Image (cartoon, helix red, strand yellow):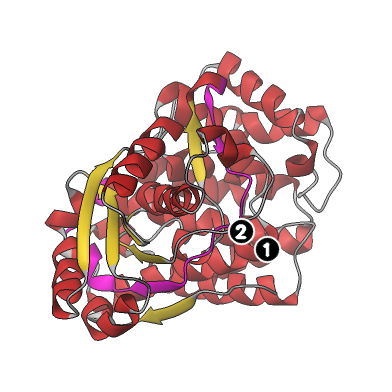
Amino acid sequence: MFMPVLVYSENEAVINNSKKIAQRGHNALIVTGRSSASRNGSLNDVVHALEKERISYSVYNKIEENPTVQNVMEAVGFGQEKNSDFVIGIGGGSALDAAKAVSFMLAHPGEKEDLLYTHCDDSALPLVLIPTTCGTGSEVTGVSVLTVSQLHTKKSISHKIFADLALIDGKYLKDIPIHILRNTALDALTHLTESYINSNTDVFSRMFADAGLDLWRKNMDCLVTGKPDDVQMSEMMNASALGGMAIAQNGTGIPHGLSYSLTYKLNIPHGKAVGYFTAGYLSEASEKDRNHILEKLGFDGVGEFSDWYKELYGITEVEDSILEQAVDELWKNQPKVKTAPFEVSYDKLMKIAFYNKNN
């Protein structure tokens, strides 16, 4: 097991740990999106902490949803101009994944964007990550997924970039829009299920997955109301982090591999896109694994889970041709296909992809 991130999950995590942030460097580059960090107070908390410790900082607040390689390189150029010596990422998975890639490229001055997808050392600038959604668990994984425009898809960079410090505070979910709450929480759920039903799973990843599933089920009613209380905000953030810790050990599986086409071609939010394929994946898993997940979540069968997904997230109309393309693209990625702990033929992959249309 390898999860080298120092994690603090508590109320006022940023302010309480300002000295630990300051230990990372003297001139911070804050990497975030255009507005959410300002609205939920996380950016203000970071600025307060840095000013308290007399640490210089610059803010790059142009990270896009599903950030492209070009978006990352623009942030790198900004950081180089400001002579930044460490990086703070604030936001959902897009901002945190981008911050990882930025910290990596800033540690390799003079290199071009191709280095993101070239195998070499994984050295990066010191990195602090602060999640403001309860979905990706990116604050505790080494993965950075970016949109590669020329390939018309999303792709993980070729490097494992773990944060030095992750600061988790549920209060940032207080005013989160319900559609973002639902989509990100569903991403966390798929991390937990795909890590558990995985050919690379072990006692440690399943420990994280089971703990995360317990927290997720306990608080899933907040996805209906859209109004999580203080305890639910904290525990959904922790469920997300546990999902990240689980996939940090063995990666995601087939639903994630199929989802990228839906996100790129139809602009379906990541969590909803992955969730679209989860029922199909559960239907093909072993009875033991399938029943374990469904029991943890309180569903009597895959059909009930599928109905819950469609009721809460809406029925997604996906053309057959796009589903076929998703299968074709994933079939070329046999390492991802082989993360399933059961034999997967092309036809079985088609059954997984078309489950929601056929049931």
Give x and y (percent) for residue 183. 38, 48
Q: Is residue 241 left or right of residue 229?
A: right
SS at badge 1: helix
Q: Residue at x 57, y 22 (%)?
A: 151
Q: Residue at x 49, y 54 (%)?
A: 107
Closer to the camera in the image, 246 or 5: 5
Amino acid type assigned to the residue bearing label 1 in the image: Tyr
CB-based contact (under 8 Å), mark 1 and mark 2: yes
Give the class, few, some or many, for how many residues have Cα within 10 Å of label 2's Cα (few <14, many ≥20).
many
Q: CA distance from mark 1 to mark 2?
A: 5 Å
- What is the number of the mark on residue 196? 1
- Which span is picked out in magenta? 151-179
Closer to the camera in the image, 206 or 6: 6
The residue under label 2 is 193
Closer to the camera in the image, 327 or 95: 95
Give x and y (percent) for residue 337. 76, 40
State yes or no: residue 258 in magenta.
no
Amino acid type assigned to the residue bearing label 2 in the image: Thr
Q: Is residue 174 visible?
A: no
- Which corner quadrant of the image does residue 239 belong to? bottom left
